[in-house]
Each structure stands twice: as structure tokens, then as C-alpha cells.
Amino acid sequence: MSEASGPPLIVELAEWLGTPAGQYVKHWEQEKINAMVANVFGYHAMQVGLPNWDLLQANRIPYKGRTHSYCDAGCPQPDVALYTDPENLPFDGQSIDLLILPHVLECSNSPHQVLREAERVLMPEGRVVVSGFNPWSLWGLHERAPGLDPITPIPAHMQVSLARLKDWFKLLSFEVDRGHFGCYAPPCETERWLQRWSFMEAAGDRWWPICGSAYVVSAIKRVACVRLVGPNWKRMKRPVRGHTVVTGRHSGA
């Protein structure tokens, strides 16, 4: 659930993604997530939240769906939509092979519960992909500066840092598979200035990789192997081979 006052954060975010800054983030996340999910196999893949942004397009799983979260009510509707509460997903346990959560954690008042639900519905060895804003980036610092207008609709105090997310993954037996920071340009709201700062992408990846304004990370649900215990068979005693005694020949007197 998002903050009580004003429209839901996910609705504001959906609108913001149409701005130059939003398109900058959207294109970067699309490229990275496409590479992450292209070779993920299984039977069922699901994207929760922002259903008009197809983040499963590069994946070849046969049964795919995109759902509205309960707070997507103000977003434009796709032809087919399922409304879900990210904190109480309407899927059976261990039924999903791939789950994508685009900026869902930071639009929820209970992001850890969202991850618990992800762990519940994922198959063993299933994969979750999460995207979010980095509160320790230039954009995040801009959010905290008094007197400056925020660059994103997500307040800095609701953004989930990657370090915090990794701790949650560890508690829920997820193993981080891969992750990326990106969008290193300073806070700019026009395409012209974002283009002028485009050289920062290569420089940021090399010199200050953890300061990207956005991140995407994928993690795999690990399940400890269960050892089947059978009947307590008694060990059969191996036959003991008799020793052959070789004696020397006695020569006649």
C-alpha cells in the first residue's frame, strides 16, 4: 500500500515513466531485464504491477501474465487484467517460475511482506526480478535536499536500497544471481540535458557503480535438499575370506 494522501504512488510512477526522465529509466531497465529473463525457462511467468510496461517480452515461457496491483486503479487498463494485492498474491504456493516486481517494493508499506509472498509462490529454483530506485544516488540525495523538487514520485524514505534488499533475500533463502546499477546522469527533467550527460553511463559503470539512480536485481529461490530416510537395514556381514597357508616343501632326508 502506498501513502494515504494523494493518488497511489504506483499511479504517479506510471505517469512519470512517460516523462523524459522516466523514459530514461524505463529504457535502461527494459534492456537489463530483457537480458536477465531471456533464458529463464518454466511454465508460468508473472509481472505484478505496471501492466502496460511489458517486462516479459524477451522471455519464452509459454504462460505469461501481467497484473495490476491493488493500487493500479488509476492506470490505463490493458485488454486483459488481473487485480492483485502484492502483499497477498492470489497464486498457489510454488506455482510460478518467474516473477517480476517493477518498483513494487517501494510503492508498498510492507515491502518485506511482498518478498515473502514472492518466496511463497515461486517454484524451487524459481526466479524473482526486482527493480527500484537507489536512495544513495545523486537522485536520492536530490530527494533529501531541502527546497528542491523531487525528481521521482517515490519519496527517498520509501526507496529500498540494494544492500537492504540483499539482506531480505538472505533471510528468505534467495540467492542473488545478478544485478546492475544504472542511470548515472544527474537529476535532469529534460531530454536535452539527459543527452548531454549520456557520457556518465560508461563512466559511472567504471568509477562509481553503486551510485546509479536505479537498479535491477534477480535472485533465485533456493530450497535445501531433503534427504529421504528409508528403513534401517541391517548391514550384511561380508564373508571373511579364509587365509591360505603356503608351506614350503620339505626335501627328503
Image: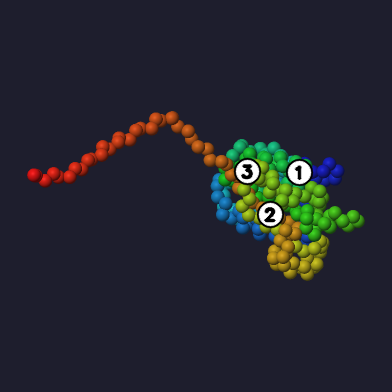
Q: Amino acid at mark 3?
A: Ser
Residue 196 x %, y %: 78, 69
For disc 3, the marked residue is: 173
Q: Quadrant of the C terminus?
A: top left
Q: Position of residue 60 (x, y in %)?
A: 57, 52
Between label 3 and label 2, give the one nearer the viewer.
3
Q: Which residue is pictured at 73% across the width and 46% down the height?
A: 105
Work out how far the residue at label 1 is from the one at label 3, CA to CA, in angstroms: 21 Å
200 sits to left or right of 146: left
Does the rendering let one see residue 96? no
Above-or-below relation of 220 to 181:
above
Q: Which residue is mark 1?
A: 108
Label 1: state its secondary structure.
Answer: loop
Circle count: 3
Most extreme residue toward the left, as rendered?
Answer: 253
Residue type, numbered disc 2: Val
Quarter residue 200 falls in: bottom right
**In the current view of this chain or complex, which residue is farthest to the front?**
253
